[in-house]
Image (cartoon, helix red, strand yellow):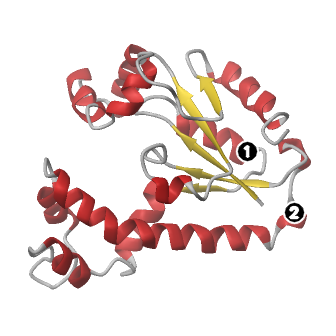
Amino acid sequence: MKTLAVTGGIGSGKSAVCRLFAERGVPVYDSDSRTKGLYDDGTVKADALEAALGCPVRDSDGRLDRRRLASVIFSDAEKLEVLESVVHPLVLEDFISWRRECESRVSEWNPSAGDVPFVIIESAIILQKPLFRNVADKVLLVDAPVQVRLERASRRDGVPQAAVMARMEAQPLLNAISEGMAEPGADFVLVNDAGLEELSRKVDALCGVLWR
């Protein structure tokens, strides 16, 4: 099966796009939720993280403390890279296993999503991480003007725009793309600046051209 990576910055609507693809029968791998699952089921081992980071990340019961881990990597780019060097290969392995399961059910493919069966990996970091970029046959960037993204995320999360902006600062490349200051580096760009009905039409149009 082909693999389409769907990416986009905070408030771009990439998750909404993935839901629309899923409604058309396309399997979607949500990298964020799957990664959390790897932490929770012990695939990501606390002792391996402590050895790599050089500091404790477990609670008093010996379990991985994700809050403590977050405080360790907060504003420390080097430790974040170390964490990613441990976790990302495990996520990649999980994705490949998941895709293999999807391939075993290819006979169930819904042709309304196009003639060529494919899966989606939803990831905000794929444009910056070759490890994940290499598993994608094509990349779809979901984008919108920065102000639209800011207002949309603020309403969705019920937080001030300043709080959203602080989170958006961790995605400089995606922000630069939205502002026209960087090339998308994607095979397709879907501009999501209207309503859900228009977004659904755009997804339908993409289904017809993705693999031509």
* Residue that carries the numbered disc 1 in the rendered image: 23
Instruction: Locate the C terminus and report the quarter of the image it occupies.
Output: top right
Tag in front: 1 or 2 = 2
Which comes before the other along the chain, label 1 or label 2? 1
Q: Position of residue 151 (x, y in %)?
A: 37, 18
- Which is more toward the observer, 42 or 50? 50
Would residue 48 appear left or right of 43 to someone viewing this image? left
- Is residue 148 something that shows in the picture? yes
Looking at the rendered structure, the kind of residue marked 1 is Glu
* Residue that carries the numbered disc 2 in the rendered image: 108
52, above or below 67, in the image: below
Would residue 204 appear left or right of 151 to someone viewing this image? right
Residue drawn at 48 percent across, 28 percent down: 12
Q: Which of the numbered marks, if any, corresponds to residue 148? A: none
Graded by Cα atoms within 10 Å as few (under 14), some (14 to 19) or many (20 or more), the crowding at tag 1 reads few
Separation (CA) of disc 1 from disc 2: 14 Å
- Is residue 156 something that shows in the picture? no
Would residue 69 appear left or right of 39 to someone viewing this image? left
